[in-house]
Image: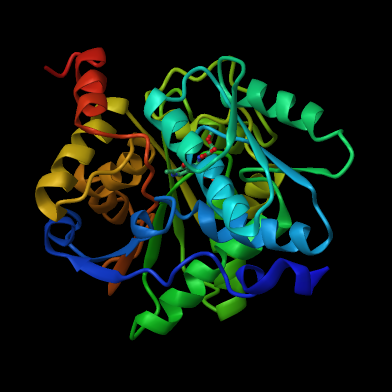
Amino acid sequence: MESMLGVENKRPFHVVTPVLQSMALSQAAGTKVYMKLENVQPSGSFKIRGIGYFCQQVARDGCQHLVCSSGGNAGLAAAYVAHKLGIPITVVVPRSTSQLTVKRLEEQSAEVEVFGQAWDEANERAMALAEADGWINVHPFDHPLVWKGHATLVQELRDSLDAKPGAIVLAVGGGGLLSGVVSGLQEVGWLDVPIVAVETRGADSFNQAIKAGHLVTLPEITSVAKCLGAKTVAQRALDCAREWPIISWVLDDVEAVKAIERFLDDERMLVEAACGAPLAFLYSGYFRQLQEEGHLSRPLDSVVLVVCGGTGIKMEILQAMKSQLGMV
Ligand code: PLV
């Protein structure tokens, strides 16, 4: 089977992304901030790491048709990979996914089905479709192969940085990125690097699970950061919080959207609201606050910010989010 798939299934689909210091973010945080630029991945986000790896494995096992439920970016990663592998794919997105994303998925030759209000309903539909013979469901965040693929991000950090960072700041949706980064930190032996896991209010299923001590299902996703909108996080994410120094942080949509604009001005890159959340953690002074309160050490040599990216954004969408939030 493997030889029939040809050269496309031999190398990873993700690229080694740049690690750059941001002067503006460093100034805001009072510590040197390195950006791990996952927004420049093919398909526009870190998702290609884990999903690319997952799809490669199932393609080797003879998968005939892929199906992926997604807020957008996981679907785009899966569609990109499926196209390269020559496997047909159906992507199920909720109604909250932008037309822009649907168009981009179709451009990647994916069949798109719009189903349900939030990602969780689209996921149920995808699982039902995957019952068909030869079909495989690509979970956007809850699978060990996905975490293994995401872990490559930390291997690259080890190769790019002179010293281990003092903390890693990242976004949490369903917790796949978080789980992968924890695996990566374990692999490279950076066993004491704390992670700040940021969500927006209204998509804060990880924070609520930590507070409750068990998984919590949000009644609905009210945040504009729809790609952080898994109503329930993966059990693995909650387990990570028991095994690893993780600080869970929740901030407002307005802060996340302001951070997108500021990042565009500072670094000339436009990212989704999902990525605005960890940016806002640094821009809004919460990093300094946690240091002052003794939750993070001070001084720290450096902080790594995972610029998770996301393609569901353009100026028109940014303006629409601002008016929805009463920011204009
Ligand atoms: N987005 C998923 C889940 O959506 C998706 O289907 O694309 N940053 C960006 C740009 C993302 O797209 C996502 C996840 C995250 C962060 C959070 O990653 P996670 O789910 O692994 O914690 C509902």
> Is residue 180 something that shows in the picture?
no
Residue in the image at 40% along x and 59% along y: 41
**Which x, y percent locates residue 131?**
86, 33
**Which x, y percent locates residue 186?**
61, 72
How many numbered marks does the figure carry? 0
Q: Considering only vertical position in the picture, is 202 above or below 291?
A: above
> Is residue 151 something that shows in the picture?
yes
Between 5 and 18, the residue placed more toward the observer is 5
Residue in the image at 26% along x and 42% along y: 280
Which quadrant: the C terminus? top left
Q: How is the image coloured?
A: rainbow
Residue in the image at 65% along x and 54% along y: 86
**Which x, y percent locates residue 200?**
40, 31
Q: Considering only vertical position in the picture, is 56 above or below 64?
A: below
**Which x, y percent locates residue 244?**
58, 60
Residue closest to the far right: 133
Residue in the image at 22% along x and 39% along y: 260
